[in-house]
Image: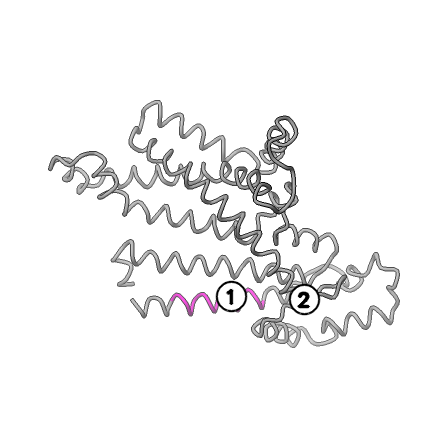
Amino acid sequence: MPFLILKRVLVACSTVIAVIVLSGMLIHVVPGDPVTAMMAQSVSATPEAMAEMRARLGLDLPVWQQVMLYLTKVLQGDLGTTIRGNESVLMLLLQRLPNTFALAVSGLALALAIGIPLGFMAAVNRGRIADTAVMFIAVLGVSIPAFWLGLIMIQLFALKLNWLPVAGSSWRNILLPALTLGLTYCALVARMTRSALVDVLEEDYIRTARAKGLREHEVLFVHALRPALISIVTVVGLVFAYLLGGQVIIENVFSWNGIGRLAVQAMLERDYPMIQGFIVVFATSVVIVSMLIDILYSFLDPRMRQK
């Protein structure tokens, strides 16, 4: 078990380093001169100012030196400074991260609270009307664009009924974006829960448990739930990692001050250090959550400990 955890940690660290290197090369993938693009709308875009900006970003160095310098700074906790306000990228991301984390947890909690019971009901009633209804709702939920659902939520609950505010960062403001995320991802959770339970319920040990006279709820929650959790944990972990990295569309629809909205502002302002910092934080969150999922697998399935 300790060897498995060490192996997962080493793989996660190497992945993060690879992402940092690739994000450090991002500025060289942009067509044209990055400094010209960043200072295109600036009144002080003189040749001297552009040369100073190029030296400040290290763009006057060879590419491999720039990448190694960026990697060294990131490993030391320095993601650079913004172009417009000359502020620390790391501090700005850390200031917005709690809002994104709160939204991600709230949205995921609603998705689980709605999706898992629906998936259970569909699996238990496989081939019946309840199963068809749940799958119809799931397909509908996956098909509806998140931004469109968010706009409908604003139109209904904020403008028509006047129950909730449209934008802000208080506890009341989180309800609409969290509900939008919950309804969007509960369909995915319901489909995965149903699929996992249907596969488990067809196993021989489930037939044996029923033949012994166990009650149906004991069969479901004692014998079937734990094996099915492996697939459910996978989709839940990936959804949470995606939400933690910043639900860009929802944060902008509801003007929620998270890192996703900050990334969009950086793209509009051509603030490449901020964009690079967002990529590093987003990728790191995905890698960390994936690593925790792999470790959790070993507790849910003892066979994983032998790999």
Q: Nearer the viewer, mark 2 or mark 1?
A: 2
In the depicted structure, whether residue 49 falls above or below residue 254: below
Measuring from the top left, give residue 249's x and y in whole percent: 61, 44
What residue did someone put label 1 on? 16
- Range of the magenta residues? 8-21
Task: Tell whether label 1 touches label 2 (CB within 8 Å).
Answer: no
Which residue occupies 15% across, 36% down? 214
- Residue 65 in which image quadrant: bottom right
SS at badge 2: loop
Q: What residue lies at 29% left-to-right and 31% top-to-bottom?
A: 124
Q: Is residue 186 left or right of residue 120?
A: right
Which quadrant would residue 175 be assigned to in this image? top right
Mark 1 Cα-neighbour bin, 10 Å: few <14, some 14–19, many ≥20: many
| Residue 217 in the figure: left or right of residue 107 | left
Task: Say if the magenta span includes residue 20.
Answer: yes
- Residue furthest to the left: 212
Residue occupied by mark 2: 88
Q: Of the residues shown, which amino acid type is indicated by label 2?
A: Ser
The majority secondary structure of the magenta stretch comes to helix
Alpha-carbon span between mark 2 and mark 1: 21 Å
Where residue 228 appears, as percent x and y from the top left, is 30, 45
At horizontal 33% and vertical 56% (from top left) the residue drawn is 297
Q: Is residue 41 above or below residue 73?
A: above
Q: Secondary structure at mark 1?
A: helix
Chain-order first, disc 2 or disc 1: 1
Q: Amino acid at mark 1?
A: Val
Q: Locate residue 177: give its quadrant.
A: top right
Q: Residue at x 53, y 59 (%)?
A: 283
Residue 227: percent from left, percent from top: 27, 47
Look at the image and tell me in which quarter the N terminus lies.
bottom left
Location of residue 220 with respect to 99 vertically, above or below: above
